[in-house]
Image: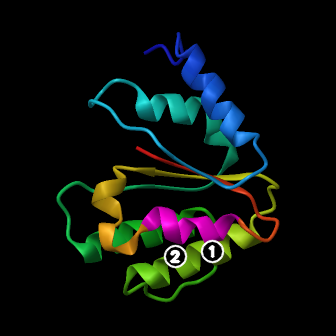
Amino acid sequence: MNNVLIGRKKEKEDLLDLFHSGRAEFITIYGRRRVGKTFLVNSLFADTYAFKATAVLDSDKQRQLRVFAGALQEYGSEDKSAITDWFAAFDCLRALLESARMRRKSCFWMRCPGLIPKALNLSRRWSTFGTAGHPRVTTSC
């Protein structure tokens, strides 16, 4: 399989401009299945990930939380306690991101609607994560 990104010039420029904006950004990329959304994001930002998680389709809350906790540990979270709800999950994510040594951090959630419930109001909650000199770029597909 060829791993070269062809075309998508405008999309690449837009995403890179957002990444280098110096502000916290929350980017949502949506579209039909199998058109290269994840490939585009990975090809541009994979070396900047401070965190990446992929939802398991049609899974309950507990399984999604286990997936999220596993991703936290994969990216170096030192918190070994069980995560029982999404607020605790985001507290662990905040600690992980604050400990990351990168100046500009990016997070990527794939299948975001399946991973994080609407009631959590992710974009509003996330906006507080980009303050205090810790700019983040978050991308969800």
68 in the magenta segment: no
Q: Residues within 10 Å of mark 2 (few under 14, many from 20)?
A: some
* Quarter placement of the N terminus: top left
Which three-letter amino acid code belongs to the residue tagged 2? Phe
Q: Residues within 10 Å of mark 1 (few under 14, many from 20)?
A: some
Per the rendered image, the range of residues in magenta is: 122-130
Does residue 77 appear anywhere in the picture?
no
Q: Give percent across and percent down for residue 113.
A: 31, 56
* Quarter placement of the C terminus: top left
Tell me, for residue 90, which label it has, or none. 2
Residue located at (73% from left, 68% from top)? 131
- Which element carries disc 2, helix, strand or loop? helix
- Is 92 on the left or on the right of 83, as rendered? right
126 in the magenta segment: yes
Residue 14 occupies which quadrant of the picture? top right
Residue 24 or residue 80, whichever sits in front:
24
Which three-letter amino acid code belongs to the residue tagged 1? Arg
Q: Label 1: which residue?
A: 94
Q: In the figure, 93 relative to 136: above or below?
A: below
